[in-house]
Image (tube, rainbow, N blue to C red):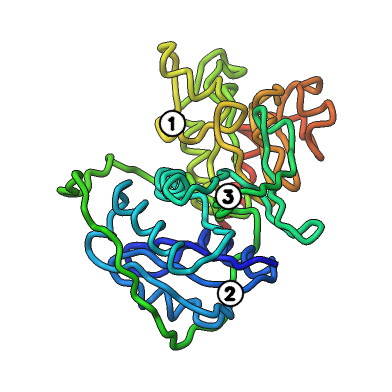
Amino acid sequence: MEPILFLAHTEADGTLAKGALEALNAAIALGGPLTVGLVGAAVEPAARQIAGCGAARILAVEGEAFAQPRYATDAAAAEALCRAAGASLVLAPQTSRWARAIPGAAARLNGRADTHATAIAVADGAPAVTRWFYRQRMEALLTRSDRPWFVLLESGCAAAWSGAPGEASVERIEASAASRTTVSGVRAPQSGEQTIRPDAKLLFVAGAGWTKKQPDGAAHAGVAEQLILGFLRASQASLGGSKSLVDLSGEGQSVLTCMTHLNQIGQTGATPRHPKGLSTCCHGEEPHVVGWRFITERRAVNLDPNCGWARGKADVVYVADAFEVMRHVNRLLTR
């Protein structure tokens, strides 16, 4: 197996995120000589965190100029680490930071880059990447002869590396810190209660039925929101929504204030990888179900026994009123 460079940027506290540890585990599984390349303001915490990964070398581009994500500095750091490592295969986590900078680094080295990979393995003695196409309806197995080959691995596609921390020897590499971009600060949007939890064991998805008229002839969006948020607090589940629900705000209808387009699951939304999923008041239309393809166990609550979920798209369908079901579930969870 050819030499491998695992490339990662550190988080604010200097350590590596779960997605980076997953990519590291995938790089180790390939079996080739491994070099680690770290980028950040201070890389010592990350180096100690993965000291036992078996890497022959740990290289680092370090400094305040590399603390914030910027194309110019990140591409320069990736290029410098690749030249120093001399690896022909570069594996990194699929983050917004690397997705922006890695293609430029590959172009500078006359290499190639593939993003959104869901798996990487050795086939016939050469690395092969699995990737989805056409709205995740087609899966392809890709190989390349061009080198260096940069591969960005999606999170949730491999187990995270979990070795013991220790002392590590780090080789500092010089990289250009020149940039026309100045980071003057961080402006974050106002945030309420956290509803998106990528590491949650359960994905709870709400459909537009929560905001429609109920048996008493009135809509109860406020009650629906309290039931949903109560369940999320008690179960620590992650919240998703159908496109029809997140689009209601543009139609002047009652909406759930905790629901945004960031929660959208489906063909034009996210494709999460939680072990279990529970859909409520959603009819299981095909574009929405596309986002569930990596959910291991699917269940749905719907008053319509002929909804899309009942046609082979869910493991279990409860024909019931979601309001009553969630009231009872919340009572059980808060005992």
Tag 3: residue type? Glu
Please, which residue is most extreme toward the bottom here?
167
Q: Residue at x 84, y 31 (%)?
A: 312
**Observer-nearest residue: 15 or 286?**
15
Horizontal and vertical percent for residue 111?
Answer: 52, 48
Distance from Cα at disc 3 to Cα at disc 2: 18 Å
Marks 3 and 1 in Cβ contact (< 8 Å): no
Q: Secondary structure at mark 1?
A: loop
178 displayed left or right of 70: left
Q: Which label belongs to residue 260?
A: 1
Horizontal and vertical percent for residue 299?
Answer: 74, 39
Please, which residue is most extreme toward the right here?
312
Q: Secondary structure at mark 3?
A: loop
Which residue is the site of mark 2? Answer: 162
Q: Earlier in the sequence, mark 3 or mark 1?
A: 3
- Marks counted in the figure total 3
Q: Earlier in the sequence, mark 3 or mark 2?
A: 3
Q: Which label belongs to residue 154?
A: 3
Horizontal and vertical percent for residue 91?
Answer: 56, 58
Discs 1/2, front: 2
Q: Residues within 10 Å of mark 3 (few under 14, many from 20)?
A: many
Q: Secondary structure at mark 2?
A: loop
Q: Which label belongs to residue 229?
A: none
Discs 3/1, front: 3
Tag 1: residue type? Thr
